[in-house]
Image (spheres, coloured by chain):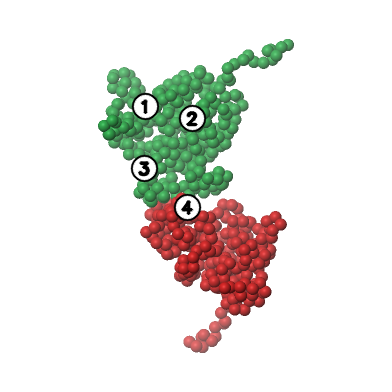
Amino acid sequence: MTAALALRAPQLMTTPPLLTMTGVSRRYGDVVALDDVSAMVYPGEVLGIVGESGSGKSTLLRMMNLEDTPDAGDYRLALPDLPGNLFELDRFARRMLCATRIGIVYQNPHLGLLMKNSSSGNVAERLLIAGERSFTALRGRAREALDASEFPLERMDARPIELSGGMQQRVQLAKAIALEPALLLLDEPTTGLDVSVQALVLDTLKRLQRDRAITMVIVSHDLGVIRTMADRVMVMRRGRVVEQGLADQIFQDPQHAYTQQLVHAKL
Amino acid sequence: MTIATLTKPWEAFSYGFLDASAKRELRRRMLKAIAVPGCQMPYASREVPMARGWGTGGLQVTLTLLKPSSVVKVIDQGADDSVNAASIRSFLSKVSGAAETWDTLAATLIQSRHRIPEERLRADQVLVLQVPNPEPLRPVEPNMSVARQMHADADYGRLWLILYEQIVRSGRIMQGASYPALVNGRHVMTPSPIPRWDLPKLHMAQHLTFLSAGREKRLYAVPPFTRVDPLVFSDVPYKVEDHAALTCHRSGVTGYFMNEIPQGSGGSVFELSDSHLGIKVIRRAKGEDVALGATWYENGKMPQ
């Protein structure tokens, strides 16, 4: 037994990355939002993106969700039947990809939810876009997804507008994970929630990540959130990646002057 | 040479009221609409001597289809004798010389608001429905440019969301009129505010149906023998209104779409919504020789 272990070659990272972005640039007029940004996310990993307001972190996330097209760059997801640069997909393929393979939670629930519909209806919408046409199945799967995001099921038919901020984020989360996406994007998911609710939502996210090994990209300006969630961290400033590495490495031994400032500025 | 020799003698209006170029444009749109069943075609909606929202879309299509040998019937909520129906009918006959009728069997051209006659339409008849809002996606997508993209992508998932919400809230589908339907397996249309009862009549029908919205400047068509499938969940079947067992208090017939008429006593009686069918049944009972056509519904059921 020990001999067999000793003979085994060192375990290297052999799985290819799930998400590969190379050389993504985007300008809005004179403003450079992204300047030659590259990123990689491995399956089951959580990538944290930190940076000040206007550093391009949300733009990058929007690119990952195919909501915007860059001026230059390449974006690939290592999924079957998805070869080539995703930025070159047509509108319909984009829509289907976003609906079925990528889940997103926005900071502002109004962006991600239909406020006039019920919470379960919001989750069911995703399933409907994917082609589910059985009422019983819709109801069952909506209930499952809401349960997984720890939403109180007795309120599943309440409209999101009647719910608290934390609950709204849970509905968004349920909607995002309803189709078991390959990639979950979180855009400041806990900003605007009070600290205790923030902790509960992060707990749910952590548990989901542990149970389902979902690949996540989380954008936040809150280092606490990134420290809790992320395996690897990317620090962005003025549209560029200034430093990246394992979370511990970044937080314990920041190299770049801006990162040092950021880490030490934490209250 | 005088101006008078170069021009046509003065006329009150051109044949069929609309000028030739307007009719030509409408005809081209109508042909296009037939070629792509259920797809909304934009057209330049003209002024007609009637306010927008009173059936101007239907009127323009009817005026384009008119010829002196036409026999026109105009229905308003099932009735031929309402002010609106009577005025449109007399206007049509005045500008074209077409004959007027109340009888579905005699008509060649039927303009209707909110109902399809109970008697089966034939291949030589054309039905024109007035549509207030032609866009089925409006409740789920207020941006019409995006809605058009959704039509192009056949991205109709959200329409089921409306039905989902109704079942969750009320335990059943509450959509009473304008029930969205998939035409020819491709485009979802709103069939104008006809009741659910009338929607199956469009499925694989022998007649041609035009639906036209004057204010929204859109027209679409259901050609003969075209599939019209109401949107349903796979485990919640399509249900028409519960009128199969109701009896008309005037003509005594059972099994058709009825209007409920409240009574002073607090109760209510029912009356056949297709008023001329009721009239024919009564006249027949009095011994007159009146022809009744075959109806879509038989004993309150639509044969499959």
| CB atoms of marks 1 and 2 within 8 Å | no
Mark 4: amino acid? Met
Amino acid type shown at disc 1? Ser
Q: Please report, as a chain letter, where disc 3 is located.
A: B
Percent coordinates x, y for residue A34 in the rendering:
66, 62
Sequence-wise, the earlier of marks 3 and 1 is 3
- B124 displayed left or right of B290: right
CA–CA distance between discs 3 and 4?
29 Å
Residue B36 image-quadrant placement: top right
Q: Which residue is mark 2?
A: B54
- The quarter of the image holding the N terminus of chain B is top right
Question: Relative to B249, is A77 above or below?
Answer: below
Q: Are the residues at dot 2 and dot 4 in contact (C-beta closer than 8 Å)?
A: no
Distance Cα–Cα, label 3 vs label 1: 24 Å
Residue B239 badge: 3
Q: Earlier in the sequence, mark 1 or mark 2?
A: 2
Rendered green, the chain in question is B
Q: Which mark is residue B275?
A: 1
Dot 1 crowding, Cα within 10 Å, few <14, some 14–19, many 20+: many
* Residue found at the very far left of the displayed protein: B265
**Local SS, label 2:** loop
**Chain letter for the residue marked with disc 2 in the picture:** B
Between the C-alphas of marks 2 and 3, the distance is: 29 Å
The quarter in which the C terminus of chain B is drawn is: top left
Local secondary structure at mark 4: loop
Q: Position of residue B121 (x, y in %)?
A: 42, 29
As helix, strand or loop, the secondary structure at mark 1 comes to helix
Comparing B28 with A38, the one in front is: A38
